[in-house]
Amino acid sequence: VTAAPNAPPRAPATGASRTFALRKLASLGGAGPATAALVGACWLHGRALDGPVALASALEAASRHAWWWQPLVLAPLALHAGYGLTLCVRTDYNASRYGHARNWMYIFQRATGVVALLLVVHQLYAFWLPVQRGSLPPALARDALVAMLSSTAGGVPWLAMGYLLGLAACALHLGYGLWTFGVGWGLTAGRRAQRWSAVACTLVGIAVFGWSAHTLVALATGWRLGAPAGAPAGACPAPEGAP
Amino acid sequence: VIPPVVVYGGGPAALATALALAERDIAVDLVGPLPAWRWPVQEEGGMNGAGEPAQHLTDTLRAGGARVAHAPVAAMVNAAPSLLHWLARAGVPWQDGRRRLPGATAEHARFVEAQTARQVAMALERQLARRDGVRRLERHDLCALARDDAGAVRGVVVQDLFSREVVALDASAVVLATGGPLLGLGGRLGGPCPEVALAIAARAGALVRDADVVGASLASFAASGRRWLLSGALRAEGARAWVPLDAREARLGRDVPRREREGLAEDLDSTEEAAAAVAWRLLGEERGVFDRKARRNTPLFYLDASHLPEEHLRGRLASELDLYERLVRASPYREPLKVAPAAWGTLGGVSVDHATSAEGALAPDSPRNHATSVAGLWAVGGCTGLYRGGARLSGNELCADLFGARLAAGAVAIALDAARAADARATALEATRRDAERAFARLAEREDGAPEGGPATLHAEIRAALEAWALARTADGLREAAERVAAVRKRVERARAPRGQAVLLRSVDAMATVASILIASARTGAATAEGVVVRLDASGEVTQVGVAPRSVRAAADAALEPASPGGLDDDRALDVGDAGAPPLARAVEATDPVDPAPEPPPTEPRGRAAPDKRGPARLRVRVLRQDGPAASATRRWERFEIDRRPAMTVAEVLDAIAAGGERRAVPVAWDAACQPPACGACAMRVNGRAALACTTLVDDVSPGRRVLELAPLAKHPVLRDLVVERARLDRDVARMALHPRAGDGDSPAAAEPRETDRLRLELARCTRCACCIDACPSIHAEGAFVGAAAIAEARLADLSPDGAGERAGRLAALMAPDGIVACGQAQSCLEICPEEIPLDEALAAAARGTTLAWLRSLVGGGARG
C-alpha cells in the first residue's frame, strides 16, 4: 500500500536559516556596495573628461582610501556575483512558453549580470590592478584609457562597443535589481508602490547608462555633450602609437 | 493495538469525520479515489446557521415535509451557529452579510461567493493537515466490506487505481462519507463515484432510504459538451427567472421589454419545487426561448441578473459567473443567462440510526448515532438519509456534514471494541480480499472491448433513463425509466471496457444498482410520506421495499414491512402524477439541456473551427504519455485525431479521445473531479503552458489547424499519462502555512465574522492546481522554492481571525532555504493563475514579514511575528 502519511508540519525551531541570511546579504550587496561601486566608477572615469590631472588626482585619492572601501565593495560584490552565477545555473528558463515582460526581465537580469561581471573583471584587470600595482602611473591613466577605448580592429572599435554593451547591461541590471530589491525586502509591498518604484528604478537605470555612456563615447571619440560645435575633434587625442 | 477507523470519501463530510476522530486520538485511514478535498462538492451557495435557530428549524421542517427525522435535525440546527463560528476560526473567509437561499423564509446562510462548500472543505483539510494519526490512501477505490461470520464489518478491501493492487485494510470501524449519489445525472464517469460505496453497503445489507427523492437545480447551462450546474446563490442574490410572453419571440433576451416577460417560479422558494414547476412550464406548455436558427422553441429560460449592479455580482458570484462568461462567451453581468432546470442526483442514501432521550431529543452519546443496519459500518453526509428531509432546505447540507461527522465520530469512539477477535478479523479480511481480487480479475477479462456499448455508453443511458423521469415525475416516465434501467443492468453484466478501464465497469454497475434502488423506492415512495427504505441481496437485486422505520436497528433486527419483492412491478406505487398528462418525460428527454447549447451572442464568434463543406473539422492531438510512476522509460508522444467542435474544452477533447479511442489503445489517464473549476485536479500542460483542462478552450490555444499538445505538469512526479502526484505541494502548503488549530471555545477575533477584506477572499480561491509551480522559473529542481501557492496560503493564514497564533512558526518556515527568499519575482505565477489570485501581493507581504523578522532577530534574537 502506498500511503501518504499525514505528518503534521512542524515549524523550524530556529528563525532564519543561514541560506536566508546569505541570500539577503547577497541581495543587499547588489543594491548597496555594488551600486556604490558603479556610481563611483562612473564618477572616477568621468573625471577623465576634465583632463589627465583630474583623473590622476581622483585615482590617487581612491588608492589612498582603498584599504577601507575595497573590502567594503569587493567582498559584497563577490558574494553578489557568486550568488548571481548560482542563480543563472539554477533557473528553469521558460520565457519561450511564458513570455510576459517580467519573465523576460527575470532572464535579462541574469544575462546582464553575467555581462556586467565580465565588464567589472576586465576593468579591474586592465585598469585598476595596474594602477594599484604601479605599472600604470595615475598621470598616464587617462591616456591609457583613451587608447584602450579608441582602439579598433579592422576599423571597428570592438572594445568600446563591448564596453557600451557592458554599461547597458550594468544599467539594466542595476535598475531592475533595485526594483527586485525593493520587492524582495518588502520595501514596496503594494502594487502601487511597485509601479512607482519601477518608474523610479527605470529612471535610475537610464541616468546611469546616460552618464557612463557619455563618458565612454567622449573618451573613445572625443565628442562631448555640450561641447562647442567648433571645438577641435581631438579634445582627447589618441596617444602616439594608437591605431 | 486497535486498528484504525477507515473513512471513505474526500469531501467535507469525510474530512470532518477524519478530523473529529483524530481529535479523539483515534487513528484514521482516509481512503478515496481522489486526493481529499478535491472531491466534487455541492452547496456552494452558502451554509445555514447565521439566522434565528427557531426560524431555521421551522424552515427546515417545512422544506423536509414528513420525512424529516426531527431530533437530529433539531440538534443540527441548534449546532449550526457554533459550526459557522468554528469554521470562521478554521479560516473560512465568510463574506459580510447573509443570504436567503431557496426554500428559506429568512437570511440563514453565511457564504463565500459561490464556492462555500469548497472553502469549507479547504478549511477542514488545513485543520486535518495539522493532526497526527491520519493516513491517506489516495487513488484507492472501495471494492468490498470485509465482514466476519456475524456479519459485522471488520475492514475494507480497496484497490489502487493505478497499480490495480487489491489491498485489505484492517478497520475497527468503517465510516462511509462519500457525499450524495449522483446517479450519473450530474457526475462524470471516471471521477469519484459515490454510487460504488452505496451499492457495496447495500449489498452488504445496509438499508437505503429515500432514494426516490431527487435533488434538482433550477439552473444549468450547456457548454463544451457538458452540463454545468449553477448554485442557488444567483437566485438568492436577486436574479429573476423568466420567459418571453410570446413563445416565438425572436429578439435576444436583453432586448425583450420587461412588460413582455413572464416570471417563472416567483412564489416558489424551494429549489426542487421551482425546478419542477419551471420544467412543466417549459415542456408541458412548450414555453421557453425561441431558437432563431432552428425556428423552434427550446426548453430554456432566462435567469436574469442584469438589473443588479455588476460590482455587487462580481463581489459575490464572480467564480460562478466568470465560468459562464468564459464558456458561453456571453456576459452574465449584462444580459440574461440562458439556462434549463436539471436533476443532479438523489438526496437519499444509506439509512442510519440516531438515538433519542426519553424527552425525544437527540442523545449524542450513543454508538447508534449514524450507525447503519450493518454492525461496524457508519455513514455520514450526503450518502445517508438521516438529514435528507433537513438537507432539502438549501444551505443545510454542510451543516449536516459537519454536525453528522462529529456525532458519528463520537458514536464510533464509544463503539470501538478492542476485544474483537483479531484472528477472526484477519480471516474475514483475507477472504474478502481474495474474493475482491477474483472479482476484479473477472472484470479485467472484459477489458479490451470496443468503445461502443462500454462504460461511457452505459453511463449515458442510465443518466438518460433517470433524467427523463426525474424532473417531471410522471407515471409513464417512471415506468419507462424502470424498463430502461432494467435493460441497462442486464447489459452491464456483459459489457466490455476499453483497455485499462475495467474499474469503470464497477462504477457503472454501481450506478445501475443505485438506479434500480431509486426506481424501486420511487414506486413505493408515492404511497407513503414517511419515506422508503430498500434492501438488496448480495447480488444487488432489490429484495425488499418498505416504509422507513423509526430505528435502523429495529429494521435490522426485524423484517421490513411487507412490500413487493423485486419492487419493480408493484402497481400501487405507480399512482403518481397525472396519467392523462402529455408524455412529459419523453419531452424532457427529447430536449436534454446538454444538447441545446446556448446560442452565441451575435457579436462574438464562438469558435474559429466551424465545419467546412467537406465535413467536420478534425483536431490533431499529441499527448505525452507514461505508463506508471516508475516508468519514465515508457514516456512517449502519442497522436490522436478527433472531430473538432466550436467552443470545445481540453477536457472535452480528452473525453472524446476516451470515447472514440482505438480498440487497442488505453485511454489517456487524467485527473478530473469537479463540475466547476474548483478542484484544480485537471491542471496539465496545454501547448506547453500550465492550464486547467476543464476551462481551457481549444479555440484559444490551438486555433486553425494547430496541433493540440497535452503533457503532464513537469515539476511533479508523473503517476500516469497526465496525472501527477501533488502530495508534495500539499505538504509544502501545510509546512509553510501553519493554520491555527480551530478549537471549540470562543474566540473574540472570530466572534462575529469580520468585514472580509478582498485579498483574503481572493487568496482563498487557490485550488492548489500547481500551475504556478509549473510556470515558476525559480523552481528548477525539487526543493528549490515552494512556489507561490504555499506562500499565498501562508498569507491567508496570517489574515485569518486567529492568524496571530502561529505567525512565528509561519515566519520561520517562510525563512527556510526554499521559502520566500528563493522567489525570483518573475511573476509567472501571477500570469498563469487560473483563479487570477493576486499572488504578487502575497509574495511581497511575505517578503516584508520575513525581512522584518530577520532584522529583529539580528537585533534581539529569535524571529518574532
Image (cartoon, coloured by chain):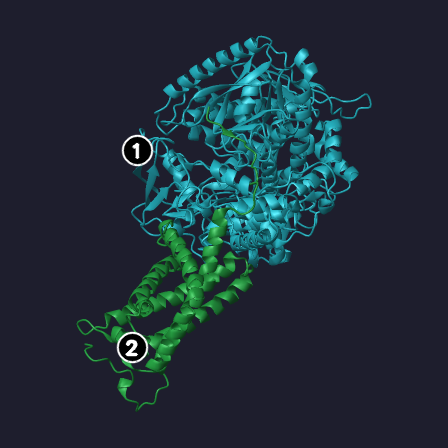
Where is residue B673 shown, x and y percent of the image? 50, 36
Q: Quadrant of residue B314?
A: bottom right
Where is residue B329 shown, x and y percent of the image? 48, 53
The answer to whether any part of residue B546 appears in the image is: yes
Q: Residues within 10 Å of mark 2 (few under 14, many from 20)?
A: some
Residue drawn at 46 percent across, 52 percent down: A23
The amino acid pointed to by label 2 is Leu
The answer to whether residue B253 is above or below residue B217 is below
Say which of B649 and B717 sits in front. Answer: B717
Q: Quadrant of the N terminus of chain B?
A: top right
Residue drawn at 41 percent across, 20 percent down: B443
Query: What SS does tag 2 mark?
Result: helix
Callouts 1 and 2 on one subunit: no
Extreme residue in the bottom direction: A230
Rendering colour (chain B): cyan
Give the residue number, with chain letter if any, for mark 2: A140
Extreme residue in the left direction: A154
Image depth: mark 1 or mark 2 in front: 2
The answer to whether residue B521 is above or below residue B464 is above
The answer to whether residue A22 is above or below residue B169 is below
The answer to whether residue A232 is above or below residue B34 is below
The chain coloured green is A
The amino acid pointed to by label 1 is Ala
Tell me the tag on residue B633. 1
Where is residue A164 shown, x and y percent of the image? 31, 70
